[in-house]
């Protein structure tokens, strides 16, 4: 692997021996794969890293946390592709804020990487492919092994922006799915061919508009929005008005609504409606002794009929049918 890796906060070609200073612990090495764990204040992340081919690093990411910070901005000349397989990532950097969801690909150079990263669903799974352009320029043999000019590709895709995002492209999703479940015996050759396919796909793209959300959301407002969300989900039996939240968290009502949607992808009441339905679904499965009326109260509905209607609009069936279907599939009951 050449002792180099890519993580949040680490250059793809920083020495592995030095990663501990970033709070990342080396776990083990299996073949050409290096496994790491990092611990945040609110959870942890798991990384699997390998060199796919000379100058190209692949990192598999799984984050089980709600946010983390990075103080890293690349000094090397990089082209980095971050593909979100599951979850959502929101970021706040010095140049702006943005978001990408499952099926999105973020193209960047890591030059605007320092900032705060939020994972609204508490779980993120993705894969990162990094090209070390300086290494490739200095190693013509390695550079000539690829079907496109990677330096020209970098200039084309990032000539005006630090980040660009490809939204929900099915072909990109198909390509990145190939990085998973690769048999160990063919990984080296297989990864090289996957990287070549990915480069040919990137060459077909037109320059992409910048990936920062408008309006700009400053760090203080992001922190308030996260605190508001945590406050709401801590006690779902209660309902709060926008005005109440605005006063409690000292944020204008319009700003609250705009920023919440930018960070979490839905208006505040739609988000909570979905959250309540998912919490109810978990209770229906875990607590068969609870009646549907009891569960309705626990997730903030005084009227069981309105609860059932809201649940069906999110989950696709009535609560009673959801419980029956789950028990039929598992054949078990649990408290």
Image (cartoon, rainbow, N blue to C red):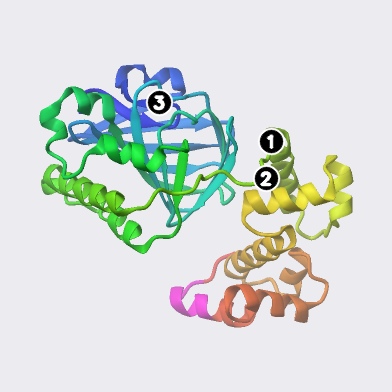
Mark 1 is surrounded, within 10 Å at the Cα level, by few (under 14), some (14 to 19) or many (20 or more) other residues, namely: some
Q: Residue at x 58, y 82 (%)?
A: 321
Tell me the SS state at disc 1.
Answer: loop
Task: Give the left or right position of residue 104, taking residue 29 as reference.
Answer: right
Label for residue 215?
2
Q: Is residue 59 visible?
A: no
The N terminus, quarter of image: top left
Of marks 3 and 1, which one's residue comes earlier in the chain?
Answer: 3
Q: Quadrant of residue 41?
A: top right
- On screen, residue 145 versus residue 40, left or right, reads left
Whether residue 133 is in magenta: the answer is no
Q: Is 131 on the left or on the right of 329, as rendered? A: left
Q: Are marks 2 and 1 in contact (CB under 8 Å)?
A: no
Residue at figure coordinates x 78%, y 65% from the top left: 300
Residue corresponding to mark 1: 218
The quarter of the displayed image where residue 145 is located: top left
Please state which of residues 98 and 310 is positioned toward the viewer in this rendering. 98
Label 3 SS: strand
Q: Position of residue 225 (x, y in %)?
A: 72, 44
Q: How many other residues sit within 10 Å of disc 2, few (<14), some (14-19) or many (≥20)?
A: few
Q: Which residues are magenta?
A: 325-332
Cα separation between marks 2 and 3: 29 Å
In 3D space, how far apart are the residues under numbered discs 3 and 1 (Cα atoms)? 24 Å
The residue at which mark 3 appears reads as: 10
Q: Position of residue 114 (x, y in %)?
A: 52, 28
Between discs 2 and 3, the one toward the N terminus? 3
Q: Which dot marks residue 137?
A: none
């Amino acid at each position: 692997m050449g002792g180099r890796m890519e993580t949040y906060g680490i250059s793809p070609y920083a020495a592995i021996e030095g990663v501990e200073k970033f709070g990342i612990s080396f776990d083990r090495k299996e073949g050409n794969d290096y496994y790491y764990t990092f611990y945040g204040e609110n959870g942890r992340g798991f990384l699997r890293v390998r060199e796919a081919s000379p100058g190209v690093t692949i990192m598999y990411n799984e984050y089980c946390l709600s946010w983390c910070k990075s103080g890293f901005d690349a000094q090397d000349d990089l082209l980095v592709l971050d593909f979100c397989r599951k979850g959502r990532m929101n970021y706040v950097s010095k140049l702006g804020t943005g978001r990408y969801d499952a099926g999105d690909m973020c193209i960047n150079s890591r030059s605007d990487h320092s900032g705060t990263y939020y994972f609204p669903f508490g779980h993120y799974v993705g894969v990162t492919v990094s090209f070390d352009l300086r290494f490739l320029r200095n190693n013509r043999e390695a550079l000539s092994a690829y079907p496109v000019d990677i330096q020209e590709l970098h200039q084309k895709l990032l000539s005006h922006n630090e980040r660009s995002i490809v939204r929900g492209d099915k072909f990109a999703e198909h390509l990145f799915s190939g990085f998973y479940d690769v048999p160990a015996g063919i990984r080296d050759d297989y990864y090289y061919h996957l990287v070549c396919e990915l480069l040919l796909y990137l060459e077909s793209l037109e320059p992409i508009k910048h990936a920062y959300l408008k309006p700009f959301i400053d760090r203080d407002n992001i922190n308030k929005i996260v605190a508001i969300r945590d406050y709401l989900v801590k006690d779902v039996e209660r309902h709060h008005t926008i005005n109440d939240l605005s006063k409690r968290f000292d944020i204008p009502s319009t700003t609250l609504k705009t920023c919440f949607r930018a960070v979490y992808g839905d208006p505040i009441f739609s988000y909570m409606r979905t959250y309540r339905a998912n919490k109810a679904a978990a209770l229906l499965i875990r607590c068969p002794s609870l009646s549907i009326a009891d569960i309705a109260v626990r997730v903030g509905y005084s009227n069981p009929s309105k609860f059932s209607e809201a649940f069906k609009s999110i989950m696709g069936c009535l609560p009673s049918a959801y419980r029956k279907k789950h028990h039929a599939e598992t054949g078990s009951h649990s408290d």
